[in-house]
Image (tube, rainbow, N blue to C red):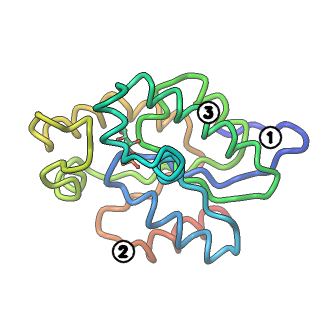
Amino acid sequence: MATSPPSGSAEHILLVGMMGAGKSSVGSLLAQRLGRPFLDVDAWIEDEEGLSIATIFETRGEAAFRDLEARVLESFLANTVASVLSVGGGAVVDPRNRAALSSHGQVVWLRATDATLASRVGSGAGRPLLAGKDPATEVARLALVRSPLYTELADVIVDVDDLTPHDVVDRVVAALS
Ligand code: S3P
């Protein structure tokens, strides 16, 4: 649950949830709807590094990616303009990221069933944690491990399964107002 943001920093909307939950598409629409900046941690890393997330995992390893992720998240959270942030699915595993998220705004968990996640990740292409594994089994395993963390953090939970991104935005806006 959220605590008050440190003085001087803004109260952001922080989208968390598993890969395939729709954080980036919902985040971009939500930001447009609210007239706020949209900050996407993974997209920023890819732009800054000039590499896909999959290539960063392959060439530098997951630990290096997690360091980058934590640094970018920290800098986004320090933004003094209230923004909408899309936070990569695994960022919540690091307790420092969880503490930072819970003190910088409203955390919205875009929750999806295992069946929805499996259909959305498909073959797992471009998703390094699924490489070489059965994507449906692995995404369900990760979701099981992370669900308690999302539960602990979430101020709002939206079940996204049968919803379009526009519908999800409606639910988020209603829940936050
Ligand atoms: C990851 C999710 C990805 C990306 C990386 C690791 C994870 O982001 O950060 O591949 O650990 O679940 P999305 O949740 O935006 O797909």
Q: Is residue 22 above or below residue 59?
A: below
The residue that mark 3 highlights is: 71
Nearer the observer, disc 1 or disc 3? 3
Residues at marks 3 and 2 touching, judged by CB atoms closer than 8 Å? no
Quadrant hosting ligand 1: top left
Alpha-carbon span between mark 2 and mark 1 = 31 Å
Give the camera-side residue of 94 and 66.
Answer: 66
Which amino acid, mark 2? Thr
Q: Earlier in the sequence, mark 2 or mark 1?
A: 1
Which amino acid, mark 1? Pro
Badge 1: how crowded within 10 Å, few (<14), some, or many (20+)? some
Alpha-carbon span between mark 1 and mark 3 = 18 Å
The residue that mark 1 highlights is: 5
Q: Is residue 173 above or below residue 108?
A: below
- SS for callout 3: helix
Residue 9's quadrant in the figure?
Answer: top right
- The label on residue 37 is none
Badge 2: how crowded within 10 Å, few (<14), some, or many (20+)? few
Alpha-carbon span between mark 3 and mark 2 = 31 Å
Residue 115 at x, y percent in the picture: 18, 52
The residue that mark 2 highlights is: 164
**Picture residue at 26% right of the left edge, 44% below the top:** 127
Residue 2's quadrant in the figure?
Answer: top right
Residue 57 at x, y percent in the picture: 33, 33
Residue 56 at x, y percent in the picture: 37, 36
Nearer the observer, disc 3 or disc 2? 3
- SS for callout 1: loop
- Left or right, 12 with respect to 44, comes to right
